Image (cartoon, coloured by chain):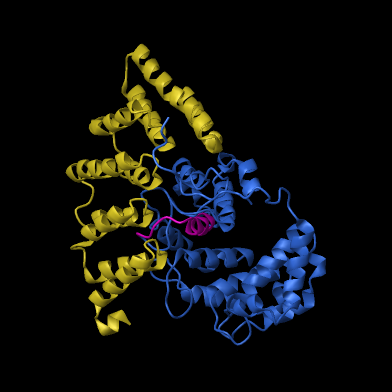
């Protein structure tokens, strides 16, 4: 019916009204994505996402929308990725136990060498030093040190990094006991490296 | 040690039951079917055949299927089929893939596929597949990975998977895989445990599970389990027992079910 009427901006407004009441409404977000894609209404969408994240940065739908917009516009170039790491880090610092911001950060780093983005290790060590103990933080630290170990040729430094990663796994088994099955698996994988 | 902000979760009441009340569950299901004037019974008419399937499966799991009236059920299901082959949720309501699956599931449960026109069901499903491999839910044209699952599951139960273009169906499902390893309803849609179940199920039926990064998706699914033991459907949402099914069965399909703390999960349920 939108196709027949050509009233795309009205549809966008409608989804915004719904999301004002229910910011995670799955159907509203899906319809919004369809309107934006079909009528190429990408302009201003990142600002919309930013507004929603400022209201509730735990809103996973908004994080997903951010990924959707960037993938379909600038795409995740090296520059964009650095920018997005900084953006996600801002929210990670605000709430280190918020799954959504960590999920976004991990998602955009998938397939990337963390070596090329040292600010990630920087962020993690900074939070750890402040005594923050969120399972997402420690999970990321495991990744950081696992990669450092794999990239290292010197066996004793390699072992040091592997030990660090393993220690984080042990810590995770205690603090995130509901996910012991998973952290034990990650630990076993480290031993196999 | 600072965790850094509280986790969105529920708190279990101290007097919550600590064991599964099987007798009460089976009594409830048997009675529900009989009380046709009950408010909730009337309000769920729009999904009646699916409700029948869920009730029958639960009774079967509890070893109580014999308490349900097989003949009555089969007669009801027969009456839901339209000439186009699809099934509506109840008599005189329009056909849809969702209700077609429930109907076929019921008939399979009772080993009675022969009471309906199976060939016409196949034709109905085939007619709903699109060029990109996706499936409409009905002729009104909504696309959703739920309908990919409904189609593949229905055809697999009838031994007719080859009737549709399985490769294209798989391709569409994979296009709904997100940056976090999860799946949504259409490309770009947020990962959601219910959609994950449908996509993983569809891929499993199609023999295409190898496309999935089991470690990444397994972790996303395991993260659905909150400290209370309950499971949610996506990050930062409250747990709901329906997600126990979507999440656990998905983990089972990708061989990672041991990543869930089953004691915590059963206590919460």
- Residue A3 pos. (x, y %): 28, 80
As drawn, the residue found furthest toward the right would be B66
- Please report the residue visible at 36 percent of the width from the left and 22 percent of the height from the top: A149
User: Can residue B162 be seen in the rendering of this structure?
Assistant: no
Q: Is residue A146 left or right of residue B266?
A: left
Q: Is residue B210 above or below residue A8?
A: above
Q: Quadrant of residue A35?
A: bottom left
- Please report the residue visible at 68 percent of the width from the left and 81 percent of the height from the top: B78
Residue nearer the viewer, B269 or B53: B269
Name the chief secondary structure element in magenta: helix
- Please report the residue visible at 49 percent of the width from the left and 57 percent of the height from the top: B199
Number of numbered discs:
0
- Residue A128 pos. (x, y %): 35, 28
- Please report the residue visible at 36 percent of the width from the left and 25 percent of the height from the top: A145
Q: Is residue B79 above or below residue B50?
A: below
Q: Quadrant of residue B246?
A: bottom right
Residue nearer the viewer, A79 or A18: A18
**Could you tell me which quadrant the N terminus of chain B lies in?**
top left
Q: Which residues are magenta?
A: B188-202
Q: Is residue B141 magenta?
A: no
Q: Is residue A75 above or below residue A81?
A: below
Q: Is residue B190 magenta?
A: yes
User: Can residue A169 be seen in the rendering of this structure?
Assistant: yes
Q: Is residue B8 left or right of residue A48?
A: right
Chain A, which colour? yellow
Chain B, which colour? blue
């Amino acid at each position: 019916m939108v196709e027949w009427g050509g009233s795309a901006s009205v549809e966008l407004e409608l989804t915004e009204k719904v999301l004002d009441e229910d910011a995670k409404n799955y159907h509203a977000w899906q319809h919004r994505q369809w309107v934006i894609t079909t009528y190429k209404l990408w302009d201003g969408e990142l600002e919309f996402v930013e507004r929603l994240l400022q209201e509730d940065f735990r809103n996973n739908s908004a994080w997903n929308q951010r990924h959707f917009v960037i993938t379909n516009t600038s795409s995740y170039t090296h520059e964009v990725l650095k920018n997005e790491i900084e953006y996600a880090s801002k929210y990670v610092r605000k709430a280190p136990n918020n799954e959504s911001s960590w999920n976004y950060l991990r998602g955009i780093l998938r397939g990337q060498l963390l070596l090329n983005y040292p600010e990630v290790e920087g962020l993690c060590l900074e939070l750890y030093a402040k005594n923050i103990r969120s399972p997402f933080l420690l999970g990321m630290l495991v990744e950081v040190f696992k990669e450092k170990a794999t990239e290292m040729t010197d066996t004793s430094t390699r072992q040091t990094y592997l030990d660090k990663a393993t220690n984080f796994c042990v810590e995770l088994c205690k603090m995130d006991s509901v996910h012991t099955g998973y952290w034990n698996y990650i630990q076993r994988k480290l031993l196999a490296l | 040690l600072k965790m850094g902000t509280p986790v969105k979760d529920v708190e279990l009441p101290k007097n919550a039951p600590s064991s599964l009340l099987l007798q009460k569950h089976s009594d409830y299901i048997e009675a529900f079917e009989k009380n046709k004037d009950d408010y909730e019974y009337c309000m769920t008419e729009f999904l009646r055949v699916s409700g029948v399937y869920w009730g029958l499966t639960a009774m079967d799991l509890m070893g109580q299927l014999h308490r349900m009236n097989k003949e009555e059920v089969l007669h009801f299901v027969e009456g839901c089929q339209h000439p186009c082959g699809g099934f509506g949720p109840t008599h005189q309501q329009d056909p849809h893939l969702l209700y077609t699956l429930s109907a076929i599931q019921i008939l399979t449960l009772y080993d009675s596929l022969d009471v309906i026109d199976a060939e016409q069901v196949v034709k109905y499903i085939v007619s709903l597949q699109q060029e990109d491999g996706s499936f409409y839910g009905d002729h009104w044209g909504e696309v959703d990975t739920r309908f990919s699952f409904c189609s593949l599951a229905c055809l697999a139960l009838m031994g007719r998977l080859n009737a549709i273009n399985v490769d294209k169906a798989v391709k569409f499902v994979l296009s709904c895989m997100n940056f976090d390893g999860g799946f949504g309803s259409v490309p770009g849609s947020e990962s959601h445990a219910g959609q994950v179940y449908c996509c993983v199920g569809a891929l499993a039926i199609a023999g295409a599970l190898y496309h999935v990064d089991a470690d990444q998706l397994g972790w996303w699914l395991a993260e659905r389990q909150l400290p209370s033991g309950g499971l949610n459907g996506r990050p930062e949402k409250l747990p709901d027992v329906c997600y126990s099914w979507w999440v656990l069965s998905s983990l089972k399909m990708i061989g990672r079910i041991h990543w869930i703390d089953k004691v915590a999960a059963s206590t919460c349920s």
